[in-house]
Image (cartoon, helix red, strand yellow):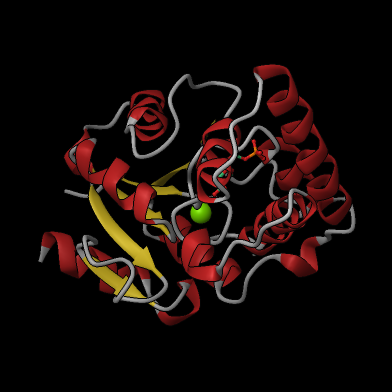
Amino acid sequence: AIKAFLFDLDGVIVDTAIYHYQAWRRLANELGFDISEEFNERLKGVSRMESLDLILAEGGQTLSDERKQELATQKNEWYLELVSRMTPDDILPGVAPFFSQVRKAGLKTALGSVSKNAPLILERIGMGEVFDAIIDGNKISKGKPDPEVFTKGAAELEVQPDECVVFEDAVAGIEAGKRGGMHTVGLGSPDVLTQADMVAPSLEHLTVDQVLERFQG
Ligand code: BG6
Ligand code: MG
């Protein structure tokens, strides 16, 4: 049976995926090139330094480790400016009702985010106390598509991987869930999230019963 739901943060609970894109784009522009929205799909769920490496490769630039650290820090400062203005109003539509259904169904919850800023964002939106377990970028050594962030969540909740459903907006996040042996729900476009077991536009367009029915009949 399904016992736990594991949620990504950026692009699932809040729309910070857009802030990441804006901040990375600003950085790329300063380096003299641009990154498209389509390219940005490849950055979702990927750690800060790995994202920078992908961006520099896209712009055909090779930089020293020291310079890369500076750029990653700069991007994070721009990103944090956007995050600092967040309030509970920035929680995506449908999240609150979905979580009350989750609680009613007696399911456990974990956050599974590669972001080191996840605790700050949860605090800003007033969701710091909502999850039974929080695994974020400070607790893991490998970003998505490695399954570490989700397998650690399942372990902390004391549930088996096949008792978990992962909710993800990122291609890398769906891959992480699958590699972890979990069921996956893609939130976004079915054309992008082709590997997900089921896809909905967002949590607003999904009920807990629909998910449970899909995975346990
Ligand atoms: C993920 C985002 O949640 O966190 C990525 O999808 C981001 O875009 C990654 O790069 C790391 O985030 P942060 O906040 O630690 O730079
Ligand atoms: Mg995401």
Q: Nearer the viewer, residue 194 or 113?
A: 194
Q: Position of residue 146 (x, y in %)?
A: 33, 32
Q: Position of residue 189 (x, y in %)?
A: 37, 76
The quadrant the C terminus occupies is: bottom left
- The number of callouts visible is 0
- Residue 202 in the figure: left or right of residue 216: right
In the picture shown, does residue 99 fall above or below 203? Answer: above
Q: Position of residue 186 (x, y in %)?
A: 34, 64
Q: Nearer the viewer, residue 117 or 130?
A: 117
Q: Quadrant of residue 155?
A: top left
- Residue 42 in the figure: left or right of residue 49: left
Residue at 18% from the left image edge and 69% from the top image edge: 213
Residue at 48% from the left image edge and 61% from the top image edge: 39
Residue at 38% from the left image edge and 75% from the top image edge: 207
Q: Nearer the viewer, residue 100 or 79?
A: 79
Q: Which quarter of the frame holds ligand 1?
A: top right
Residue at 24% from the left image edge and 64% from the top image edge: 212
Is residue 9 in view from this perspective?
A: yes
- Residue 37 in the figure: left or right of residue 41: right
In the picture shown, does residue 150 fall above or below 39? Answer: above
Is residue 136 in view from this perspective?
A: no
